[in-house]
Amino acid sequence: MAPNLHDANSVFEFVVKEGNGIKGLVDSGLSKVPGLYVQPPNERIDKENAIKLELPPIDLSKLDGPGHHEVAEQIVRAAETVGFFQVVNHGVPLHLLQSLKDTARKFFGLPLERKAVYLAPSSIVMVKKLLRVLLENIGVKSDDSMIDVLIGKKMVAMIFYPICPNPDVTIGIGRHSDIGMLTVLLQDEVGGLYVKIEEDMDYEKKAKWIEIPLVPDALVINVADMLQATTNTIHSQNLKHFTVILMALNLDDAKSIYEFVVTEGNGIKGLVDSGLSTVPAVYVQPPNERIHKENAIKLELPPIDMSKLGGPDHDAVAEQIVRAAETVGFFQVVNHGVPLQLLESLKETAHNFFGLPLERKAVYLAPVSPSPLVKYGTSYLPEKEKALGWKDYILMQYTGDDEALRYWPDEIKGVLLEYVRCSIIMVKKLLRVLLENLGAKPDDSMIGVLTGRKTLAMIYYPTCPNPDVTIGIGRHSDIGMLTVLLQDEIGGLYVKIEEDMNYEKKAEWIEIPPIPNTLVINVADMLQVLSNGKYRSAEHAVRNTNISSRVSVPIFTMPLETATIAPLSQVIEKDGIARYKEFMFVDYMNNVYKNALNGKKSLNFAKIG
């Protein structure tokens, strides 16, 4: 049944949903284009003012003879300017080209239920030749394996443009660029292909479009987005394979780097594996954000023996914990109840995970991850950071064993679950000590609310060629209650000195050196709020090294999202003033996650006055 041409919904149903297409619309006998197809004036192509391209077609038969260099130069010139060119003597039989056009017309004349796909594979010999020429021009020595990767996915289309009663106000295909490497186009004798002029092309500025006229027996070749990305020009799209783009990657091109590392999920490891010898500019930190290892103080506090809690030395150990929480906000613990063999297994598992192929890790990139519980990425908030962090990570929310077993990556979930179970017991012991020192009497219910949300991470810091000007993780404080951190033997953790700490003023940072068999504990923002500022959430950062890649495995324990947080009444009564307001933890969390890392400024959300 013919559509009502004055009703956009009726036209849409007939053409798109029912599959009749534009041909069905034309066959219905229309004399005027429906309003749905009328283009805005700025999207129309003015045929009279378009430039007719007069470049002669390129003779591909000469590529294998003495005229190779001249023909290669013509191909490269066309690819560098318009991005379109026509080729003759291309190896595709002329009778096949005519047959294709006849077949296309017959195909679109078939009944609706009979339309199917038509494939012409013989043009792939030709595409490989062109691609070799263009890659060799940028210094890339391509072999069959590389070429197969670059053109491994092929798509063939037959497009039918029915007669249009109002061609001046419609468009066949809107302006676009193709997403692949090279497109091979067979035009019929009617024509209608136009290419947009870019700003730096040497053509008359009065015209915006160049017409690509029909040349008998020729095929049209156009450069697509992936070839532009590979030759390191304006932009790149999402690449499944990244080997070739790195051969031409401009390390000062922030957009290209960002897409490769962040959007495509190759991470810093992929960047390092490409063989770079210097850090791209997008990772260079401002001088005031860098950590100078030589000027940092090495923390010499001995680790705290947790096995003594509950025994005759309980009070002495509790005092050590409290003292550390009141000053630096960091301390290390031994005899913590986490099996030492498990700690070694965690470090090995982290290295193995980040060594997996990209397609295995990229499953968990934020836009495509099968679960909101798992996120794979690199810098913390890259779209807002002045300089990106030199790390990769996978982040996992723990809501229970069932969800973890279902959603966490198979390669790491077993060892991480065991680590969570052991660590939470230790966290509860530490939190009881710290809360009791404030005058509170914490029961299981209170502890459960304050540590009800848990996030685990595996963080990978690849070797960095310029560690002095980069940062692994920028300075920040953690947002929860207590963080448990497993360092490896490489180290790199630094804590910022606050104004009233009794350390030499010439230094800004304290180094937390790795001690075998220990776990690092740090006070986070919510514990500072509960204590009304008595305990310090530690502002810290991670420095890179050019010695070796390193891993760390933190567990962030946080309140339930719906928990109400405020200074404990016992502390306010003693201090005579509340320094922080009452708020829901979810509001604090949302405020932090929308801003880039910036020291302890996130606590300003909770401060009074």
Image (cartoon, helix red, strand yellow):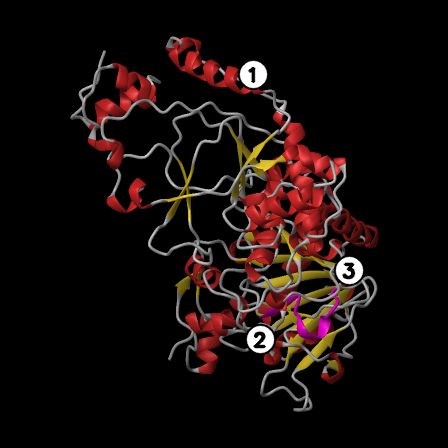
Q: Which residues are magenta?
A: 464-475
* Mark 1 nearby-residue class (10 Å; few <14, some 14–19, many ≥20): few
The quarter of the image holding the C terminus is bottom left
Residue at the spot x=72%, y=82% of the render?
296
Location of mark 2 (residue): 536
- Does residue 428 lie above or below 436 as drawn? above
Q: Earlier in the sequence, mark 1 or mark 2?
A: 1
Label disc, if present, on residue 384 of the rendered structure: none
Among all residues in the image, which is located at the extreme bottom? 505
Q: Decide which of tag 3 and tag 2 comes sooner along the chain.
A: 2
| Three-letter amino acid code of the residue under disc 2 | Arg
Q: Amino acid at mark 1?
A: His
**Circle 3/circle 2 CB separation < 8 Å:** no
Residue 601 percent coordinates (x, y) = 49, 74
In the foreground, 356 or 504: 356
**Residue type beneath disc 3:** Ser
Q: Crowding near pointer 2: few (<14 within 10 Å), some, many (20+)?
A: many
Residue 418 percent across, percent down from the top left: 72, 46
Q: Tell me where residue 30 appears, x and y as whole percent.
A: 20, 20
Residue nearest the observer in this picture, 549 or 260: 260
Q: Is residue 421 magenta?
A: no
At a point 75% along the width and 67% down the height, the residue shown is 465
Q: Residue at x 72, y 68 (%)?
A: 544
**What residue did someone put label 3 on?**
549
Residue that carries the numbered disc 1 in the rendered image: 95
**Image-based side of 46 in relation to 154, left or right:** left
